[in-house]
Amino acid sequence: MRKTKSLINNLDWPLFIGFISLIVFGLITIYSVAFNEEFPNIFSFSEKYGKQIMWIGIALFMGIMVFLIDSDIYKKYAFPIYLATLSLLVIVLFMPPINGARAWLGVGSMGIQPAEFAKISTALLLSKYVSSLNMRALSPTNVLLALLILLVPMVLILLQPDAGTFVVFTAFFFVLYREGLTFDPFLLKFVNLIPKVRFKQTWLGSHFIPILFVFVFLSIITLLFGERNIPLIPGLKLYGSVGIISTLFVLGAIATFFVQRFGLKRAKSKAQLIIILCFILGSAVSLTVEKSFGSLAQHQKDRIELFLGLKEDPNGKDYNRNRAMAAVGSGGLLGKGYKNASVSSVRTNHVPESETDFIFCPFAEEWGFIGSFSLVTVYIFIIVRILIVAERQRSQFNRIYAYSVGMFFFYHFAVNLGMNIGFAPVIGIPLPFFSYGGSSMLSFSIMVFILLKLDSQRRHVLR
């Protein structure tokens, strides 16, 4: 009894209250959007709002069970939990496809998505493994194992295919960067084989997050100029990856000239090597993006092309995003009022999936800019609060896990909001605790309750 009282006293109440607030407002919005006059009772389990209440009840029960378990269990059994979710990710590949993806286990509406729970297990195992490493003496094997923990579930999720969850998993790269795990051990092993070249660290390996953004930029440029057949160099018919590689070569040649002409003698060889590596990696990224894009399913190509503005189809393949933006805009400053959504209501069906991936639309339409701003503020508060919780942890395991949860929230919030207002492609990412769905509700609840548990016992952890 005393132990339970101590846990409750040490609970991070601002985070818990924020989490409960989102669940309540999410349920209210689902009730409004999916309201059926024949079944007006919110506990009607034949309707989506009734089913959501059931999932909320299960999620809270699971969360309380998770909170009562000793926090050492999560670190001790991280590997078995990880293997269990990997097994589910393999099994789901042999299930009948639903909406073109093999992502569900179960029967009918009671199915779950193993990929949602793979986020938790990967976060736990990655936290356990990285916290055991000496960041000042990393070996190529250390980096490889950390990447394998991350890449194995990502590959299995991509095979489903579930592009949205795959994108969310890239959040772990930011967490690794925060903890100081770089690709330097890999690069140094090969670079230092070159005669007269000795690096203690490489710019490429130590700054892979900024480099990741550069690669994303290169990928977008490759698709933009490749699909539109616009030459990167005026007067020369160099499109797509060929244009990117040619441009990189020219820039590399110019950089090499300036290094040779004005660079320090002792730094010339290293600078030239970095230029060569940048050229090779940039060319590889451009070629890979171009080839990968060609191998995508047509509906995936359409979503990317519509998002990049390579084609327009407001009443066809871009219908969802187009109507979502119309619904958000129609809310005005103060909104149309509760249950008065017309564009995004399930009854009108102008915005498909308005209770799941596009749940922000009816909320914005009913509560307007003021309500939308308030909801965004709550999400930002929760993300910032998670980061505060992460920074006050004594245990590196706890800190890594907390940052993983924070990045998951940020990814889901940013991408889902972007989908609803036209700033991101439609890739099927739910809004945490707000969208209708059991898997998302269960996984995020368990994820948050584990974090609350770890934080409640932080004072008992030795540095």
Image (tube, helix red, strand yellow):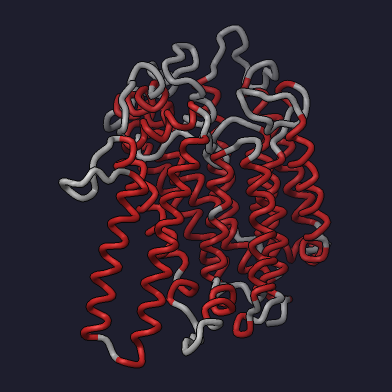
Q: Nearer the viewer, residue 387 or 415?
A: 415
Farthest top residue in view: 38
Q: Nearer the viewer, residue 115 or 36?
A: 115
Q: Is residue 267 above or below residue 112?
A: below
Percent across and percent down for residue 380 are: 44, 52
Q: Is residue 165 left or right of residue 414?
A: right
Question: For the point 73% across and 24% down, which residue is it?
Answer: 96
Q: Nearer the viewer, residue 314 or 224?
A: 224
Q: Is residue 274 left or right of residue 238?
A: right
Q: How many marks?
A: 0
Question: For the point 75% across and 49% down, which residue is it?
Answer: 64
Percent across and percent down for residue 205 are: 49, 72
Quadrant position of residue 39: top right
Q: Is residue 416 above or below residue 354?
A: below
- In this rendering, does residue 452 appear at all? no
Percent across and percent down for residue 5 are: 75, 62
Farthest left residue in view: 235
Quadrant position of residue 320: top left
Q: Nearer the viewer, residue 323 or 318?
A: 318
Q: Is residue 202 above or below residue 63?
A: below
Quadrant position of residue 331: top left
Q: Quadrant of the C terminus?
A: bottom right
- In this rendering, does residue 82 appear at all? yes
Q: Is residue 175 left or right of residue 384?
A: right
Question: For the point 45% across and 46% down, which residue is it?
Answer: 289
Q: Quadrant of the N terminus?
A: bottom right
Q: Is residue 418 left or right of residue 130?
A: left
